[in-house]
Image (cartoon, rainbow, N blue to C red):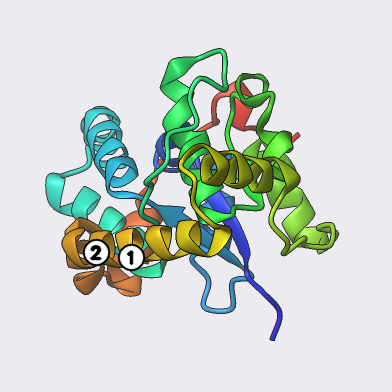
Amino acid sequence: MRRLLQVILDTSVIVAAIRSKRGAAYRLLLQLAAVDARWQINLSTAFVLEYEAKAREHGAKFGYTDEQIDNFLDFICSIANEVPVHFRWRPLLRDADDEFVLELAIAAGADYIVTFNVRNFVGAETFGIKVACAARIFTSFRRNKMSEIQTQIPDAIYKQIIAFAEREKLSLEQVVSLALAHSLGTWTAESLIAERAKHGSRKKFLEFMSQVPDIEPDEHDRLS
């Protein structure tokens, strides 16, 4: 079975998706939500809270109710991969507000970060993560020309693990065991995404998406 491409959707992409159904973000999100999707969204608790805050803030401007926003977010959580983020890699980016996006991508072993602020993520490639706008990803998805997926650990992450092990006087096996134990404990404790996922409904999600305004998207969200 072919491995699903792992992606991180920046909050700006989520906002654009609920603003205009003519934009790349809207169409990309529908592709990601498809039954036969070859991509998987990755989320952390912090990310869901960010999604919710921005979706409610901008959703109010577009006339959406809280229930509609909940239906939208519940379904996204139901198809996403929940990722606990344990290690802080800061500072890596010039904008501190983008650090938690990259940290989630690293923790998830993501292939892509989808954002409208591509320049803000210079350095992500060090971790084997590609950064692209929604239009580019959507176009590539349709043409099925995505590059081969690398499953091995990027050199930068491996070097960080080695450095951590040496500093703490631990073996690599001990580092991995500690990370796994911590992850398992966190997964059982984090329930926000799982709780939303229980209420996820593809029907309600598609009903919401059908109500997104059929207006011109912002310049950065245009397909051509």
Looking at the image, which is closer to me, 143 or 217? Answer: 143
For image coordinates 69% across by 56% down, the residue present is 153
For image coordinates 33% across by 65% down, the residue present is 181
**From what the image shows, is residue 195 above or below residue 210?**
below
Side of 206 relative to 224 (left or right): left
Q: In which image quadrant can residue 222 be found?
A: top right
Looking at the image, which is closer to me, 74 or 63? Answer: 74
| Amino acid at dot 1 | Ala
**Residue 185 screen position, x and y as percent:** 24, 64
Q: Residues within 10 Å of mark 1 (few under 14, many from 20)?
A: few
Placement of the N terminus among the 4 image quadrants: bottom right
**Residue 165 screen position, x and y as percent:** 53, 46
Q: In which image quadrant can residue 186 be found?
A: bottom left
**Residue 218 screen position, x and y as percent:** 55, 25
Residue 184 seen from this side: yes
**From what the image shows, is residue 2 above or below residue 103?**
below
Kindly check if marks 2 and 1 are in contact, taking CB atoms under 8 A apart as contact. Answer: yes
**From what the image shows, is residue 151 above or below residue 114?**
below
For image coordinates 48% across by 65% down, the residue present is 33
- Secondary structure beneath label 2: helix
For image coordinates 69% across by 50% down, the residue present is 138
- The residue carrying mark 2 is 185
Side of 66 relative to 106 (left or right): left
- The residue carrying mark 1 is 181
